[in-house]
Image (cartoon, rainbow, N blue to C red):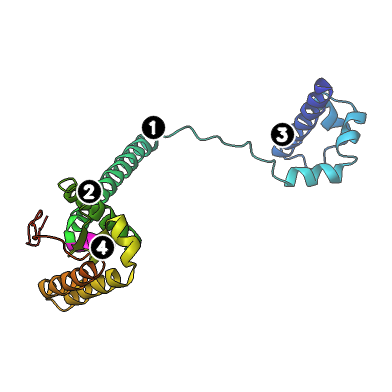
Amino acid sequence: GHMGENDQADDRTRLLASARTILARGDNKFSIAMLCAEAGVTRDVFRAHFGGKAALLAALMTPEPAEPVVAAPDAWLERRLRVFERAMQELILRGLTTYAILQLGVFLIVAIIVALPGVRSALTPPALKSYRVRQAARRHFASAGARLSKDEPHVLIFASFRDRKVELVAHSNIHQIVGEGPWNAAIAAVTDAMSAGKPADGFVKAIEICGAALAQHFPPTGAPKNRLPNTILET
């Protein structure tokens, strides 16, 4: 048990201490019996630890292992560590704040750039542009048709200069009879003229194409009536 191990350790310690005391007195030829008497142990205990005098002398020449030294905490070092920790926390917080401000700045710059009509149009996918122009054309067609009766079919040529898209919407009665040919030709005329920087010429040509198709399939009866303005409407 622990008691036996501790007693054996104490016996060994007393034997070594007694041997050093005897040698300090100048008695280099001491006997085992003298050492045991000095240490207060029996010969059997001596033999259990050293076996003989030679082993005892060898143990005396071997330095005893030093007890581990546990350094007391240094108050100054602890204070410096706390200061360093606070400084690191402030640095991290400052870095995160700077990063958030930079992100906000980048977001605002991008938002301003994208808000520019030219940039926004360049970034808009072609399919979305076509859909947007088509919907706008249908709204204008419905608005113009509200002034006409069902017996007065009409055609709307709608162009978006910003998106470079052209839509032609025709009354269903006209579309069924005329077909796609004249409408596609009218759209091509406006599109080509817009690319050349002469959109007005393109509208004139498109109106001529549509007028010829309407005159062919829907010849006028009676005096002409202007129910809609003869000018290009800009919105």
Residue at mark 1 to residue at mark 2: CA–CA distance: 86 Å
Indicate the position of residue 68 as horizontal and vertical percent values. 61, 37
Is residue 129 among what the camera can see? no
Question: 163 or 41, which lies in front?
Answer: 163
Indicate the position of residue 18 as horizontal and vertical percent values. 75, 32
Tell me if 226 is positioned left or right of 102 in this view: left
Q: Residue furthest right?
A: 44
Question: 177 or 181, which lies in front?
Answer: 177
Our reading of the magenta stretch's main secondary structure is helix
The image quadrant of residue 125 is bottom left
Which residue is tagged 2? 142
Residue at mark 4 to residue at mark 3: CA–CA distance: 118 Å
Is residue 130 among what the camera can see? yes
Residue at mark 4 to residue at mark 2: CA–CA distance: 14 Å
Indicate the position of residue 119 as horizontal and vertical percent values. 21, 62
What segment carries the magenta color?
Answer: 118-122
Type of residue at label 3? Thr
Type of residue at label 1? Ala
Which residue is tagged 3? 21
Tell me if 68 is positioned left or right of 58 in this view: left
Which residue is tagged 4? 167
Q: Residues within 10 Å of mark 1 (few under 14, many from 20)?
A: few
Tell me if 211 is positioned left or right of 181 in this view: left
Q: Residues within 10 Å of mark 3 (few under 14, many from 20)?
A: some
Which residue is tagged 1? 75
